[in-house]
Image (cartoon, rainbow, N blue to C red):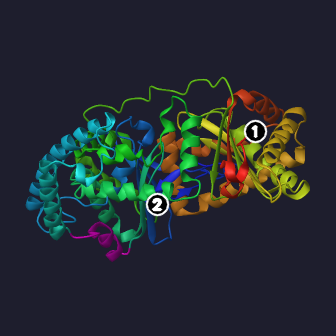
Amino acid sequence: MFERTRRLCFTFLLAVSVPFMADVGLGQRVTPSVHTLKNGMKFLFVPRKGDPNVSCGWIAKVGSVNERPGVTGVAHLFEHMMFKGTHAIGTSNIQQDLKIIQRLDVLRSEIRQQEESLLEKHRRGVINNPKDPTSRSEQHKKLLTEFNALLEQQRELIIKDEFSRLYRNAGGSGMNAGTSWDYTIYFVNVPANKIELWFWMESDRLANPVFREFYSERDVVYEERRMRVDSTPTGKLDEQFNAMFWQSSPYSWPVIGWPSDLEGITRKEALDFFSVHYAPNNLTAVLVGDFDPKHAKIFAERYFGRLKRGPRRPEPIRTREINQLAERRLAGYAETVPTVKVRYHTVADAHVDEPVLIVLAGILNGRTGRLYKSLVLDQEIATNAGAGVSGLKFDGYFSLIGVAAKGHKPREVEEALYAEIEGIKQTLVDARELQKVKNQQLAGDFRRLRSKSSLMMQLLVYDAMGSWQNINKFSDRIQAVTRSDIQRIAKKYFHPSNRTVAIYHSQLDRIDPSPTKQGVAR
């Protein structure tokens, strides 16, 4: 939970850790065969003899950081839409399907005008709730009736989940996808004799996407947001904490998007987003397993070679985070145990300071780390404590967390966290303590290289974040971290004006301000 992470939000919004580094200290080098198509799409082939399955994946260098206010959540929405099929997959009558989609777009535009009218009335205080059905005009109701009737007609044409079923019937497994702030990733395992099927299916959903059920799937994502954010004990507070931490950066909005944007994104806006960010010149694919790279190159040219470059290159991220000048604090109540979360602004992925921060997190984190030993075992003021690094593509942060033990206040935990940081600043870490963390990192690197799927994911994410070649460099940088590096970095980043603090109080601790029960609220 508190190790170095690159956040990867799957379709069911599961956050997973992706600490992608290579074990170069034991002589391990990843040397894929690199093949780049004329349209700019890159392929990395890593043959491994003896394994009957091939881990296949591709990554689009686009995530929520590439969005803008008004269409937040569109990158994650696309992850959903990419499983809806193509002209050849997912429908029994493509011509009728396309006609319905075209009419749905027209109706949705007209419905949007009606919704904007209600929003304007709500803004002026004429109505209390713009979503109240009784406030709708007769024209609005008529449009909705036709819209819903067309959705029912379309459902009769749809062959549900045909995309995933084709893979399963061919022996494929583990098909999934994920959206993060910085990238969107798609992956599956297929038998070695079925890799041509993978090339055809994946290129087909890029060459001939339909995005059927767009508006109903938008509602599915909205419901997903409600379940994963609104209905969880601290989901809303976590979201507000993140938005408060980032003042100007596009990392401030959630990957799943803001509610009002999810309700309003149009299919045209989504298609425009797709044409730029899902163009082959913004994609990388990786195959790891028992296959012949010569055959794979032929398939890549045959299937993905038909894709056209995007109409323009994706716009670079322009708005960066401003320097924080003062501590920010958030305090809230939730159905949770009292918890302290502290974030410091640090550096982006692959920055020269990131390896030091990763090692520092290792010293602080885990059952044998300083935070757990001090706060949980020695002082007994917390039930859990840890630290972590998040190196994003354009920025990053370092986290501390502590969960207060019964009878102890969050403020005690917070001060104890700072005390451990101050100890790092004042005294060089023990040489054996540092070497232990490096050894653990090295062992983890080795394990991650042995798995086909893990190696495939590492290469994809490394390439999306900068360059796949960093997989052969990062462990050397970890091993080069010194005791003085750690002290220097602690002094550089861990000061009050650079931190944002969240205190989550238990609902049981909320003071009732009612005069009849509590007197004057303090």
Q: Amino acid at mark 1?
A: Ala
* Residue 342 in view, yes or no: yes
Work out which quarter of the rendered image holds the C terminus and state it.
top right
Q: Is residue 221 magenta?
A: no
Camera-side residue: 46 or 342? 342
Residue 232 % position (x, y): 54, 59
Is 225 positioned to the left or the right of 295 in the image? right
Please give the range of residues in magenta. Answer: 159-171
Q: Is residue 270 above or below residue 47?
A: above
Give the dominant element type of the magenta stretch: helix, strand or loop.
helix
Quarter of the rendering containing residue 125: top left
Q: Number of numbered discs present?
A: 2
The answer to whether any part of residue 294 appears in the image is: no
In this figure, which residue is indicated by the disc labeled 2?
Answer: 227
| Residue 144 % position (x, y) | 17, 55
- C-alpha span from label 1 to label 2: 44 Å
Closest to the observer: 211 or 213? Answer: 213
Specify the amino acid type for callout 2: Met
Residue drawn where x is 82% and y is 52% of the image: 436
Which residue is found at the position 43% from the left and 52% from the top? 185
Q: Which residue is mark 1?
A: 480
Residue pictured at 65% horizontal, 61% vertical: 447
Residue 439, given in percent of the width and then of the height, sits at 78, 53
Tag 1: Cα neighbours inside 10 Å, few (<14), some, or many (≥20)?
A: few
Q: Residue at x 39, y 41 (%)?
A: 72
Q: Vertically, is 369 above or below 54?
A: above
Among numbered discs 1 and 2, the one appearing first in the sequence: 2
Q: Position of residue 131 (x, y in %)?
A: 30, 50
Disc 1 secondary structure class: loop
